[in-house]
């Protein structure tokens, strides 16, 4: 049987071992906290770099699109075609605003296929034709108009 003194000696040894291990764990925790902070900083920097690269990519795509449109316009000019790279699409609200609600004062003509109005879209004076669906016979004629 163990004496009280021997039991206390064993407990003292275990306490020292636990204190040593506790110190090791605290140092490891401090080291991991420092690494965690460094990783959070790197993540913030990489997020910033990613946003910057995404912005540059978007700008490059826009520049590429503009270049392609300019090249198409030049090709069309060389072929004697008008320099319109793409047809723009506008919604009804934009067309109504451009023509002051298709008002009589903006009306510039009427033909067999519809009424033509003067308007301003994107700082450009335009003619807007409202086709009469009763006079259009088929998609080809619609597209021709």
Image: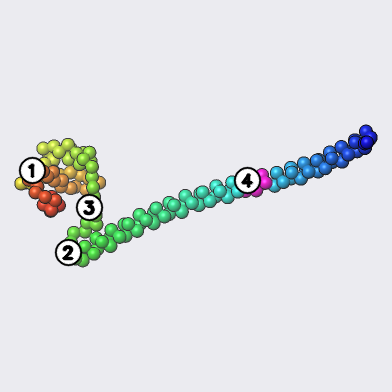
Label 4 environment density (alpha carbons within 10 Å; few <14, some 14–19, many ≥20): few
Kindly give the residue lying farthest to the bottom in the view shown. 78
Q: CA distance from mark 1 to mark 3?
A: 25 Å
- Is 111 located above or below residue 85 in the figure? above
Label 3 environment density (alpha carbons within 10 Å; few <14, some 14–19, many ≥20): few
Q: Nearer the viewer, residue 106 or 8?
A: 8
Q: Residue at x 60, y 48 (%)?
A: 39
Disc number placed over residue 87 in the picture, else none: 3
Residue range corresponding to the magenta coloring: 32-38
Q: Residue at x 13, y 40 (%)?
A: 106
Q: Residue at x 30, y 60 (%)?
A: 68
Disc nearer the start of the sequence (1/3): 3
The answer to whether residue 117 is left or right of residue 72 is left
Query: Can the viewer see residue 7?
Result: yes
Read off the residue under disc 4.
37
Q: Secondary structure at mark 4?
A: helix
Q: Secondary structure at mark 2?
A: loop
Front: mark 4 or 1: 1
Kindly give the residue lying farthest to the front in the view shown. 1
Query: Can the viewer see residue 98?
Result: no
Disc number placed over residue 134 in the picture, else none: 1
Within the image, what quadrant is residue 62 found in? Answer: bottom left
Read off the residue under disc 2.
80
Q: CA distance from mark 4 to mark 1?
A: 72 Å
């Amino acid at each position: 049987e163990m004496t009280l003194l021997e039991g206390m000696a064993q407990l003292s040894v275990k306490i020292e071992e636990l204190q040593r291990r506790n110190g090791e764990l605290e140092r490891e925790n401090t080291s991991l906290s420092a690494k965690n902070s460094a990783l959070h900083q790197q993540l913030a920097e990489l997020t910033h770099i990613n946003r910057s690269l995404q912005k540059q990519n978007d700008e490059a795509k826009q520049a590429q699109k503009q270049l392609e449109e300019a090249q198409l316009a030049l090709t069309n000019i060389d072929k004697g075609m008008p320099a319109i790279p793409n047809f723009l699409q506008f919604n009804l609200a934009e067309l109504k605003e451009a023509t002051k609600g298709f008002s009589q004062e903006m009306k510039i003509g009427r033909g067999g296929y519809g009424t033509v109005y003067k308007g301003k879209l994107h700082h450009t004076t335009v003619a807007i034709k409202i086709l009469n669906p009763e006079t259009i016979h088929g998609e080809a004629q619609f597209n021709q108009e």
